[in-house]
Amino acid sequence: MAYDLALPPRDEAAVARVVTELKVLFGDRCQTGAAHRAQHGHTASFMATQAPDAVVWPESTEEVQALVRMCAADRVPVIGFGAGTSLEGHVNAPAGGVSVDFARMNKVLSVHTEDMDCTVQPGITRKALNVHLRDTGLFFPVDPGADASLGGMASTRASGTNAVRYGTMRDAVLGLKAVLPSGEVVTTAHRARKTSAGYDLTRLMVGSEGTLGLITELTLRLHGIPEAISAATCSFPTVEAACNAVIAVLQYGVPVARMELLDALTVQALNAYSGLDLPVAPILLLEFHGSDAGVEEQATTFGEIAAEFDASGFVWTVNAEERTKLWQARHDAYWACLALQPGLKAVSTDVCVPISHLAACVTEAQSEAARLGFQVPVLGHVGDGNFHMCLQFDHEDVAETARALGFVSWLNDLAIDHDGTCTGEHGIGQGKVAYLARELGPEALGMMRAIKRGIDPDNIMNPGKIFDLGNGGPAAG
Amino acid sequence: MAYDLALPPRDEAAVARVVTELKVLFGDRCQTGAAHRAQHGHTASFMATQAPDAVVWPESTEEVQALVRMCAADRVPVIGFGAGTSLEGHVNAPAGGVSVDFARMNKVLSVHTEDMDCTVQPGITRKALNVHLRDTGLFFPVDPGADASLGGMASTRASGTNAVRYGTMRDAVLGLKAVLPSGEVVTTAHRARKTSAGYDLTRLMVGSEGTLGLITELTLRLHGIPEAISAATCSFPTVEAACNAVIAVLQYGVPVARMELLDALTVQALNAYSGLDLPVAPILLLEFHGSDAGVEEQATTFGEIAAEFDASGFVWTVNAEERTKLWQARHDAYWACLALQPGLKAVSTDVCVPISHLAACVTEAQSEAARLGFQVPVLGHVGDGNFHMCLQFDHEDVAETARALGFVSWLNDLAIDHDGTCTGEHGIGQGKVAYLARELGPEALGMMRAIKRGIDPDNIMNPGKIFDLGNGGPAAG
């Protein structure tokens, strides 16, 4: 059976037919202008824009269903679009097709405070959701750097700074509704906290990057806002000392909510970009959640353990404003790092390794980057073993681009050799197709393809992502 | 395409051929005697035994691979067997075939204390694993009532008494190896704490009940043994008051490790079976994990909240022996309940609902059981909204059996109507095939079938489980 997940053949007449139909159904909510199209194929990365043929803004699951049926009938690709903050080219349209922008499906449909869950449309962003929840005593924890949409976060299995305590989108989604390529609406689970009812379709859709269907509703697990929150920072002589402190803290069972590593270069970038005055050295940014007494005990225990690893300058605060400033700065780190060398494009790596391998991997990666002449800040969700290097390069310089992408490839291999993964939270998209095969082998790829083939036989759902392509891979643009 | 997941047609010659081949390869580790066969199709439930044609005890992934290839070539069913503690007929062989007993694949392959993970073979039981981990300061939390095997627990997405704090098998498995129906060995993930590398094959295999492949290795997440542990019990005037106390405790963010509800009848059964002297009333059994001060604070906070819901008789202990006795009694609850009416068969329900619906569901179920003339103890993992009713009936009395199964059906519908699931942790097996369809609808079933078809086109892997059958459903035996 020939099914190599190559891009579907492009049929201009079919595309024109579908766009005409969409304009009838969606009116002004279907746009084909160059600006809209370019914006929807633009990624927050070095990758070249691959614009869709049209952009549609649906307002309901039924509209998404109608749209998918039209596209499926003519085998025209369908690409979901949330906030456009993907770092791996997820929203690109290498074979054209229709970009489905969920901006108008951004409502909170229900909040069940006693059950600590809510049901939302996929277009709402994480910050907007937390604003909505403000008066319930509950919050939604998953926080990638950008103010991403929940649908996009689910599609890439995103996480953020507090996954070490609250988990990732894998844990946060109780169930979802999605429009399948057949046009059917599937419900993967209801609101029970746990279930053993058949295959875990929720977890299959989470992280499937829009290649199996379009998520139109999400039921999310929420958490109680802790009675007390305190933030802290401390410096270490080396990245290794910081990593070892984190290992000891986790083994001791201190339930730290956030534990972020910044190398000296990232600290410098943050100080400049966000007006902070952190000491320029490897530091940990921390947050403790609990009761008043619990938070104080956590901070004290952390301080004692960290001291054994030569930590210094331990500063902590319960002041909400100072905390917010610190964490907003952390979330702006990508932009702060880009500002180190303005005008250059960047690629953000996303490897994740068992925590005992973290110090070795970071140190080796820093040496390799220096050897290649790159200045690359490092920041990491160190409790998870996940770290990012924001590598800037001149994308018009062919040799430098090759050297930069060579470094990324080398780093992904390093992580795989250390029992880790090429992507902790950004996803495969277009950028990591080759590494997925290297990481999990042909058997896992074969299994993924069998699933894709069973659910999307015509490969209309976000073609060209996750799997090997016949063509149309990423290009520096 | 005709693919209704009916049982594969039985080909006696093929079975005989495969058994002959297996005897050559496995020698005494392949048995076809009636006793072995009956034991491997026997379930800890009311369901009739459906024996396999042969039982094989492999010792390595390679042996499993060889076995699956032999069976696949002749389209002979393959049924995984762990500790035989399934409550839903998972180990039955309605179309015959080969039972693969993992008792000899019960080793711990590695423990990484710094990373807090370990890799094990599927035949090891949860208790044996914790004995092995004793000196590492780490433990594996998931604890179904029985001393189940890790492979079986993964296959049914099992949980237990401390899922409210530590999660279920969904959360506990970092990655696994499995032999697919093709004979290929798939690795679903490595040891990173989180990953966004393609479809979540780990979570797809967890809970797939042996219908997609045989798990031959599991990498598990471990937790640090807390500095302090205390257990507590307290009584409530009604089940509703107990449930409301639990909701308040969860919203307040008290990180209770275990929170188990027992109704008065279950308390009576436990007192008699395990020599306890708990007050005969709805009670909560609790456990708190943390630092010395943290545990004391949790217990105090819990006590204050519970008092608002008319709790009484709050007793707590840090004595390890008393704790162990209490929790062993809880784990023996199924047997204690069976001892209420010796000689009768039982069916254990497993519904799970949003916690705000729990009190109403339990109360309504108790009334309905009483109306039908059944005396049914209730026990629940109340922090998850999951509760069991151990319904005993005379399986030789056709009318009573129909009434008992009618109650189970009514209860599953009730849970589904309350946004819940028919199974929180036991799985679908043979017993809940009809309810899965009712719960998630034809679209989800269709998606599951598409996955099954893609990976196991000849339906050799544990046929007759999860999905609708052409025939061979459960029968009281």
Image (spheres, coloured by chain):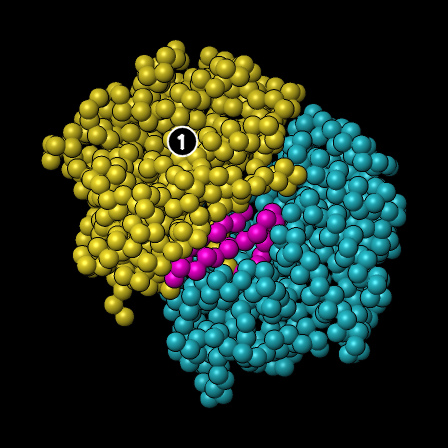
Chain colours: A cyan, B yellow
Q: Is residue B294 visible?
A: no
| A110 relative position to A266: left or right | left
Identified at 66% across, 72% down, the residue is A42
Instruction: Please state the chain letter of the residue tagged with numbered disc 1 in the rendered image.
Output: B
* Residue at 39% in and 39% down: B103
Q: Quadrant of the N terminus of chain A?
A: bottom left
- Residue B31 placement (x, y as % from top left): 27, 43
Residue B46 at x, y percent in the picture? 22, 35
Picture quarter containing residue B179? bottom left
Magenta span: chief secondary structure: loop
Q: State the extent of the magenta-drawn residues as a range.
A: B174-198
Residue extending furthest bottom?
A13
**In magenta segment, residue A109:** no
The x and y percentages for residue A2 are 42, 77
Task: Please state the horizontal and vertical placement of residue A271, each as a whole percent of the image.
Answer: 86, 52
| Looking at the image, residue B316 lies above or below residue B85 | above
Q: Nearer the viewer, residue B387 or B47?
A: B47
Number of numbered markers: 1
Instruction: Give the side of residue A153 with respect to residue B17, left or right.
Output: right
Could you tell me which residue is drawn at 40 percent across and 20 percent down? Answer: B329
Q: Nearer the viewer, residue B120 or A186?
A: B120
Residue where numbered disc 1 is placed? B147
Give the secondary structure at mark 1: loop
Badge 1 amino acid: Asp
Q: Quadrant of residue B87?
A: top left
A124 to A392, vertically: above or below: above
Whether B164 is drawn above or below B431: the answer is: above
**Residue B187 is at least partly visible in this image:** yes
Q: Residues within 10 Å of mark 1 (few under 14, many from 20)?
A: some
Q: Is residue B180 magenta?
A: yes
